[in-house]
């Protein structure tokens, strides 16, 4: 019988314990730090777990990251070099991100941010409407999340471009890559959506030069990682009028501290890192499937593209 451990200072273990009890009653799920003998633990479910928790378990066969990113494990990347770290491929998580992106793209497209400002000033004024086909949306990151969001926006009629580190082909999406491709996407995007993983290459990517490279009046949707955005540069571009609005779900420091300039900025919409939330039931089913593959055929049997490559950072 496999032994699993759950380690997260922010994610409540209760729903996961319930899911495993219902779906795999023969498996034992222990919650860090009360895991008994750490050497007995075969698999770890982790989100923002302390490095001590991972280092304490010497016989791990795999670590499952309970979220879309793996930057929370960077501190122990060296220790995990010989242990497969698996990103959970959860359709419910993907759908949540797509809902968030579509909601904000439609909001900016239909000027809802400007109508909210007019409401505060008690101004009744109709703003011009643009057809979706004449609205250029750029998506940074064409992994599972970016591809799904791009397809949803294409289905709504938007002119969609996407950028990734390596070449991609997605029906209906203008796919770009490399430095030249990034520059082209930024020049065109009236609404920019960031869904990139956090790596050394993407940290600080959205700086003043790149934000100013967007068309005047552009809007930003960031559901990637907070450290990808240089916050002071965003404020500067919003205050100058070069950017018209921003919807932010992720921040360099979370929770966003009281008194932070973002809280009261009239052009910024804030959500507390809830663009999508991992669903314990659907994720448990996925984890159980991957454990079965590992136990029967080893790492090579894991679903393609889900094992983290630490050289790439995701």
Image: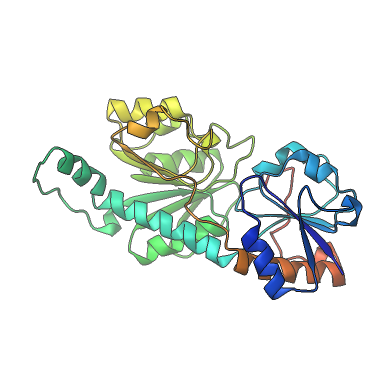
**Residue 298 sits above or below residue 186 on the image:** below
Residue 197: percent from left, percent from top: 59, 45
- Name the image colouring: rainbow
Asked whether 190 or 182 is in front, the reply is: 190
On the picture, is 212 further left or further right than 216?
A: right
Residue 115: percent from left, percent from top: 19, 46
**Residue 96 sits above or below residue 125 on the image:** below
On the picture, is 311 further left or further right than 254?
A: right
Identity of the residue drawn at 24% across and 53% down? 110
Q: Quadrant of the N terminus?
A: bottom right
Identity of the residue drawn at 65% across and 55% down? 66
Identity of the residue drawn at 45% across and 29% down? 231
Identity of the residue drawn at 41% across and 27% down? 259
Residue 224: percent from left, percent from top: 52, 45
Residue 208, visible in the rendered structure: no
Q: Residue 77 lies in what quarter of the image?
A: top right
């Amino acid at each position: 019988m496999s032994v699993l451990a759950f380690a997260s200072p922010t994610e409540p273990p209760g729903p996961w314990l319930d899911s495993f009890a219902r779906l795999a009653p023969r498996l034992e799920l222990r919650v860090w730090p009360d895991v008994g003998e750490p050497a007995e633990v075969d698999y770890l479910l982790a989100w923002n777990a302390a490095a001590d928790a991972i280092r304490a378990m010497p016989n791990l066969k795999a670590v499952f990251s309970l979220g879309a990113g793996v930057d929370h494990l960077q501190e122990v990347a060296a220790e995990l070099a010989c242990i497969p770290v698996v990103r959970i491929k959860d359709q419910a998580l993907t759908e949540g991100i797509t809902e968030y992106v579509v909601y904000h793209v439609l909001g900016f497209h239909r000027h809802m941010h400007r109508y909210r400002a007019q409401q505060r000033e008690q101004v009744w004024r109709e703003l011009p409407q643009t057809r979706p086909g004449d609205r250029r949306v750029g998506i940074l990151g064409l992994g599972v999340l970016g591809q799904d969001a791009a397809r949803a926006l294409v289905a709504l009629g938007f002119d969609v471009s996407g950028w990734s580190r390596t070449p991609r082909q997605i029906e209906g999406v203008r796919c770009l890559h490399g430095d030249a491709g990034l520059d082209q996407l930024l020049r065109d995007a009236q609404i920019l959506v960031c869904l990139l993983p956090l790596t050394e290459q993407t940290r600080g990517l959205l700086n003043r030069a790149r934000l100013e490279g967007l068309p005047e009046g552009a809007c930003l949707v960031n559901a990637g990682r907070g450290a990808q955005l240089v916050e002071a540069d965003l404020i500067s571009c919003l205050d100058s009028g070069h950017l018209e609005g921003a919807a932010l779900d992720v921040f360099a420091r979370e929770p966003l501290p009281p008194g932070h300039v973002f809280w009261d900025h009239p052009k910024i919409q804030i959500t507390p890192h809830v663009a999508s939330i991992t669903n314990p039931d659907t994720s448990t089913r996925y984890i159980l499937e991957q454990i079965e593959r590992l136990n029967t055929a080893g790492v090579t049997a894991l679903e393609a593209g889900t094992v983290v490559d630490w050289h790439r950072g995701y």
